[in-house]
Image (cartoon, rainbow, N blue to C red):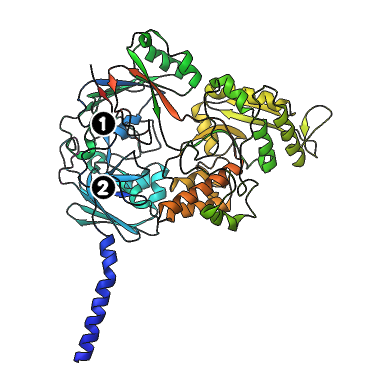
Amino acid sequence: MTRSNLTSLCRALAIAAFSLLPVMAAAQAKHAIAMYGDPQLPPDFVSLPYANPDAPKGGRIAFGERGGFDSFNPYIRKGRAPWGVRVHVYETLMGRNWDEPFSLYGLLAESIEVGPKREWVEFTLRPEARFSDGSPVTVEDVIWSFETLASKGVPRYANSWSKVETSEQTGPRSVRFTFNQIDRELPLIIGLRPVLKKSDWDGREFDESSLDLPTGSGPYVVGEYEANRFVKFKRNPDYWGRDLAYNQGLNNLDEIKYEYFRDASVTFEAFVAGETSVYRELNAQKWEDQFNFPAVQRGEVVKSIIPHGRPSGMRGFVFNTRRAIFADWRVRDALIYAFNFEFINQVINKGRAPRAESYFSNSELGMEAGAAKGVVLELLTPFSDSLLPGALKGYVLPKSNGKKRNRKNLKIAAQQLAAAGWNVAADGILRNSDGAPFAFEIMLRSSANEAIANLYADTLKRLGINVTLKLVDNAQHKSRRDSYDFDMMFNIWSLSLSPGNEQNLYWGSKGVLNQGTRNFMGMDAPAADAMIETILTSTSRDDFVAATRALDRVLISGRYVVPVWYNNVSRLAHKSQLKFPARLPVYGDWLGFLPEVWWWED
């Protein structure tokens, strides 16, 4: 080789090495990962910001639950498992800090490493990670768990696993997952998959429901139980992770018990009688009227208000636009005008509950008032021909004067119905040009929403609309909901500060025909699909926020739901000995709060 060729080769190698530096820099093992930007807590953090690392250990808490359980496997379709199994018994590779929109910190894994475009993720397990029987948590357990959940677990695990091209062990305690597409959320989703002990299922099928006791790696183990009546979770004194910074101030209670009752009224009475320790009240009026019983007066039960900064989500009556009667947006607009929120809110909540003005209101992700501008306008403009009125210029829910008759809004509703081809006939019934009456059914699962539906139905009768209320049991409701066999139903979508892949499940156009999604309204909006894609591929928080605000505009202006109210606080009545830190997470009373950071203090 000549000196000239050697010099050229060295120069080429130097350039190649230099070009790899950003890749090498991007692929560093770290203690945490954030969806956007950097995690807030440094590698040497001492506890989560909303936990009390000096909280005493001991005491017990008892929750009242509706329904029952007949299984200890919460990850399959068959059977009903206690919620506490997945929360207290099983662990994930990473754990969330609920004071950030979406950041994960090492739990079973001591570190996480990602490719420059997050095209792969690698986790390294902690050497001390153990299951409750003392056996180590291995890479084999991790890979088996994720593959089994995807093939035999509930569908949500298969959805994300379909984007995993390979999973391989890369070291004694390291495992790498390589993806077949770029999705910046995937490393975090994988980090939140539960890790199960493979040998637990030797000789039995994973997808068969049973009451065999699980072997998890979490801070609690299953104690006494009686199917459909109660289950106790006992704090494991030998829990491997008790000294982790992530766990300081968490898992303070010695016993967590779930008592099961047949309905909400019995659950409340059990709390009043002192059989359970805490009660969440969603109704502002009941909070004022019914929480003055003797134990409250004596100070044995205290009432705590927990504010939060998470999105309002959406709660209300959903139009199934697959039904011809609701296909025209003007019809949906009319029925939103007919809903007298101010009057109904006064009757049900004494006017105390705020209305969900959009899907992401109560957070920075919610659409801003007025016309779209800046990046939001740029994102929506290519879809201007398919957007409904209000998406670009601004949409505001109609308001009434609070009086029962709601004449002004009913007049607008009648005009919108007429524009859509519906007019009141001589018999007083609203009919279309073919003479067909405007009639539909509202499917309800809980009698708690029956009062709202009755008030709404009474108003619609004044427009010549015949509404039938249908109260169904849980099984029938789920079957009809998942197959979209309803005209209108009451539903709740809870949304986070970091919307991601689940948005496709909620609003993606594939859900118009594919059953089992949460696109109950049958929404088919190209702009929504595009905004979801932008949310998933944004590399900056500013772009992510803009895309979410744009999606919010498409959703609320689509008039797919008659919005009611949401709770901007949680109302918790609890025994006075139960304490929680003064510093609250941004998510408030949400996952990771009760009972995780609470303690018992005599």
Secondary structure of residue under mark 1: loop
Q: Quadrant of the C terminus?
A: top left
| Amino acid identity at mark 1 | Leu
| Amino acid identity at mark 2 | Val
The foreground one among 512 and 32 is: 32
Q: Which residues are the magenta region?
A: 127-132
User: Is residue 300 shown above or below 95?
Assistant: above
The residue where tag 1 is placed is 213
The foreground one among 85 and 55 is: 55
Residue name at image x 48 percent, y 17 percent:
286
Q: Quadrant of residue 306?
A: top left
Crowd class of label 2 (few under 14; some 14 to 19; many from 20; radius 10 Å):
many
Residue, far bottom: 2
Q: Quadrant of residue 203?
A: top left
The residue where tag 2 is placed is 142
Residue 510 numbered tag: none
Expressed as whole percent of the image width and height from the top left, the position of residue 147 reads 32, 49
